[in-house]
Amino acid sequence: MISTYCIVPLYLCIKLWKNRSEDLFAWTLLATITMVYLTYMYRVGAWAMVPTGYYWRDIVLVALIIVMIKSFFQKKRSLLPGWCNIRNLLALLFVGFVCTTQTMGLYYSYKSAGQVPVGVELDFPLKNGLFYIVQGGNDPLLNHHHEVNAQKYAIDIVQLNPLGLRCNTLHAEELRHYNIFGQTVYSPCNGRIIRLINGHENFAPSVMISDHPAGNYLAIQIDDSDRFVILAHLLKNSFLINENDVVVKGQPLAKVGNSGNTSEPHLHMHVVETLANDLLFDEPGVPMRFNGQFLIRNHVVKR
């Protein structure tokens, strides 16, 4: 992950910055692959999940713009004699393949973002902080839950500190190192608690329990609706409500934990259409909007 988000972008930017060749063909290939790769990563990368933090994303974008402008005006270039050779053609094919696949990924990502049904309007379930969407969107590139029917529009949320880091240490070995661990979860809607699962332990970071994927979780039936909100990976014995309780928007419910099939503390949230089958996997997923916004990866919510 460090290489994808840090080493490769730095290498490409430095190489383009220092490029003083008069070979227009070679410069065009380097500039194209640099621009496409960094634009692709800017859109689909989970930037808060690397040690450099979320704001590294914007630093890389600014660096790309500066390097592209500087390199473009640095030297007059032209096609050199004999540029059309096997080596250059192979390089062109490689760059063309990489750029085509990544450009198509970007196209479908932006296209799918504009094809989201209206869904349901909810309050954001966390307060008093800066929160980052790790997984979210109408596209498997941005949301690894997308292929699961019930979780098609699910979001995973972590909390950032003022430096854009999700942990308060570079090498987080304990749950308390994660900013979101132990944060209060608030009801995103008026409704009734129709399911509450407690009793699953919190495990150390990177210890994932596939037998109980949601860990401790609760399901809220939205008032005057057959739709249900699921909030998962909650802290054992942190629940402030019981099954069948009526809750209102903004009411404290529980705390964020690290129970279930999760590599680190975060809050998982999704909405399903009915209660006929499995709330976690099989029911039809429903898009969620917060203040009218459909949240996707790299969105940041300040509360």
Image (spheres, rainbow, N blue to C red):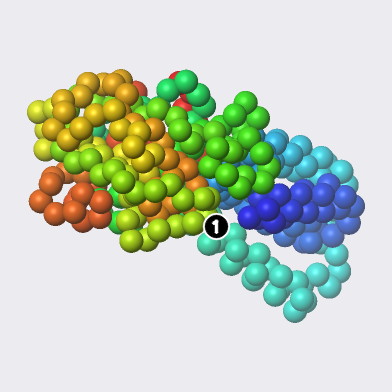
| Quadrant the C terminus occupies | top left
Residue drawn 64% across the image and 71% down it: 93
Question: Alpha-carbon neighbours of circle 1 within 10 Å: few (<14), some, or many (≥20)?
Answer: some
Residue at position x 25%, y 44% from top?
197
Relative image position of residue 239 (x, y in whole percent)? 30, 33
Res 189 seen here: yes
Q: Amino acid at mark 1?
A: Gln
Secondary structure beneath label 1: helix
Q: Where does label 1 land, which residue? A: 102
Expressed as whole percent of the image width and height from the top left, the position of residue 240 reads 29, 28
Does residue 244 lie above or below 291 as drawn? below
* Quarter placement of the N terminus: bottom right
Q: Nearer the viewer, residue 141 or 100?
A: 141
Q: How many marks?
A: 1
The answer to which of 78 and 111 lies nearer the viewer is 111
Quadrant of the rendered image containing residue 222: top left
Is residue 114 in view from this perspective? no
User: Left or right: where does residue 291 sit relative to residue 285?
Assistant: right
- Vertical position of residue 25 compared to residue 155: above or below: below
Residue 258 picture quarter: top left
Task: Judge from the rendering whether residue 187 lies leftward or rightward of residue 46; answer left or right.
Answer: left
Percent from the top left, x then y, of residue 5?
Answer: 66, 50
- Front-lying residue, 180 or 6: 180
Write the residue at 59% across / 59% down. Answer: 99
Relative depth, front residue between 247 and 239: 239
